[in-house]
Image (spheres, rainbow, N blue to C red):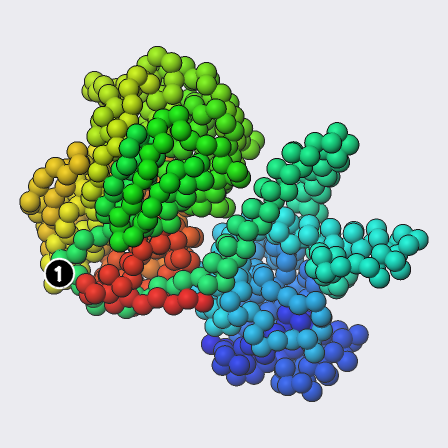
Amino acid sequence: MFNKLCIIGVGLIGGSIARAARENKLCTQVSAFGREQDLANLQQALALQVIDSYSLEMEEAVTDADCVIIATPVGAMPDILQQLAPYWSEHVLYMDAGSTKGSVVEALGIIFTTLPDNFVPAHPIAGEEKSGVDAALVDLFQQKRVILTPCAQTDKKFLQLAKQFWQGLGSSVSEMQVAQHDTVLAATSHLPHIMAFALVDLLGRKDEQEEIFKYAAGGFKDLTRIASSDPTMWQDICMANKQHIIPLIEQLCSELETVKHMLQDNQAQALHDTFTYARNARQRFLDQHNNMNQSITFTIQPGGHLQGQVRVPGDKSISHRSIMLGSLAEGVTHVSGFLEGDDALATLRAFQSMGVKIEGPENGKVTINGVGLDGLLAPKEPIYLGNSGTSMRLICGLLAGQKFDATLTGDKSLSGRPMRRVTDPLAKMGAVIESTENGTAPLTIRGQSNLQGIHYDMPIASAQVKSCLLLAGLYARGETSVTEPTPTRDHTERMLSGFSHPVKQDGNKVTISRQGKLVATDIDVPSDISSAAFFLVGASIAENSDLTLQHVGINPTRTGVINILQLMGANIELFNQRIVGGEPVADIRVRSAALKGIAIPEEFVALAIDEFPVLFVAAACADGTTTLTGAKELRVKESDRIQVMADGLQILGVDAQPTDDGMVINGGSIGGGTVVSHGDHRIAMAFSMAGLRTTAPIVIQDCENVNTSFPGFVSLTSGLGLNISSEEG
């Protein structure tokens, strides 16, 4: 990638960058810069063949370099940038490797009139207890995450170059905003180091320190390991990021004060609950950490097509509800076509934790031994729902009427998504639900049986909110009714009727009461139209495509994607239409077509809310301009789907302009490049389909969550003609 790489600060990080860059053939030569007091370290780096040359003069060190990386402690960064400024070249990529980013950007702003567009702030999440160049490792960055925090001025050309460099070192690259980075790292890195230093300082000053250290077990060693880190480096980090660290210290002190009162007041159960939650939270961290270290990257080569016949996985919405209502029914419910994705499995495990015996899934078959409306048992620990917003919002409604307390938790993405849209109307019914100050998970639902039916006019159309309130209505006195501004998916109403519970429908108003019971039934889950949508778009935009999708659910509250594509000129034919288990299904044939840009009618937005990531790809391939409005909900899905899709399309050369509640896309050709899905399964699959029309390969990072809705996506699409490969890293 580079002829000459210059490292400023050849310690553990700088030396490891040099070793890895040389090993992976990313540069021809490595130079280094250091101060007079660094001379011995520089000589050691040269002797170890970590670098090819060094200089104590900045000009000499950076001359002819086409990449310069500052790997000094963050406290030294302003002085280094000041020395570097006279020799700054607009053709060179500059990066740092510091643990804080705000202080670096601030220093750049002071030294330069405007922030340089060729500086990319970078933070490799990697390190060792030892420091110095002799501790440098060639594989330090292998399977480690590197966070880039580009500014508004950062040139995408240099940002892409930075990504390619760190990926070449074996790292998984993510992007964050500067302030977000410093806030997150204060909690996950800086505060733990302060705690370790403080604990060792506390115990080391005690009179009996020799006895303490003599009998300290492995737990003390593990807890305080990071106190072996370089004090100067951590002094600089803490001072640079103190605005984010100090509030965390205050929160930690409050938490410790709470534990102290538990001990003083002999609150053994409260202490046990705290420790149990912490243990489960740490296990989730380990699970997520392992997933991160085995991140999945898709690569799509251009020139593919889609041909043949296929049945895509079962409908996720119906799979969720089959578990929920089957668990509350009287008798045994048999489900076939169940989606064995992570989200639906999270719902299944949740009801198992509340005492429901569920067998399977095996080849899409699940047997649920219902316990009746009043048969759920208190879970022994918080219910972890992973990434599934549907699980959390719907189960919240069911738990509101139980007689026991329960806590719902999720992964980082789910924990950042809004829950007030369900907790506020549930509170009007009498539910007692505790959440964070921002109204996000974890949610603790207090057991009580005083729910009162209400009428709720939904301000924004949402099937999840409607379903949550209807499920709570199974336990409320009187009638519970919901009126929606525009129709949304009605799987809950259909399935309640299928389980023999009375539901009244009057236009956009649906009403339920606790009068009645759920009777077990058999459910054949149709293929998910949200999963089929990727193929509807893919076969439309790829030449020589002719694909038939079998047994697809065509519930009229879900067919917005078909309506929109047909308005764009897609060649879509529905045949063999029938009713299965109360749900309309059909086989769908789709063939290549010349799409045109349209203004998407707002009445179709709620009917296609989950399909817009791939519809944006269709718009990018269409002739003319496509405009979407009225879709603000897309900003609070698994990711901000408006911004993430706009960013990705722009990387691929598409004129995609995000708006507050939608996007304006000027269609045309799509180029290649590397995009990040931000852990959003629909983003990853949408860009996979874009590969059918690109002029160069697409690399899609962070694709592991595709399994939440579409297990086997890569093998299935490859068999149909998409030139896709998957790599774990």
Taking 476 as reference, is 348 above or below it?
below
Residue 584 shown left or right of residue 136 in the figure: left
Taking 184 as reference, is 609 above or below it?
above
Quadrant housing the C terminus? bottom left
Q: Where's residue 478, x and y in %?
A: 35, 12
User: Which quadrant holds residue 688?
Assistant: bottom left
**Number of numbered discs visible in the structure rendering:** 1
What's the residue at 70%, 63% (across, down)? 73
Residue 236 shown left or right of residue 151 in the figure: right
Q: Examine the rendering and report whether any part of residue 609 can be seen.
A: no
In the picture of the structure, the residue carrying the numbered disc 1 is 308
Q: Where's residue 410, x and y in %?
A: 48, 43
Q: Secondary structure at mark 1?
A: strand
For this rendering, which residue is in front, 194 or 541? 194
Neighbour tally class for label 1: few under 14, some 14-19, many 20 plus, Cα within 10 Å: few
* Residue type at tag 1: Gly
Q: Examine the rendering and report whether any part of residue 586 can be seen.
A: yes
What's the residue at 64%, 66% (across, down)? 127
Residue 670 shown left or right of residue 385 in the figure: left
What's the residue at 89%, 52% (across, down)? 206
Q: Where's residue 271, x and y in %?
A: 67, 37
What's the residue at 12%, 37% (across, down)? 579
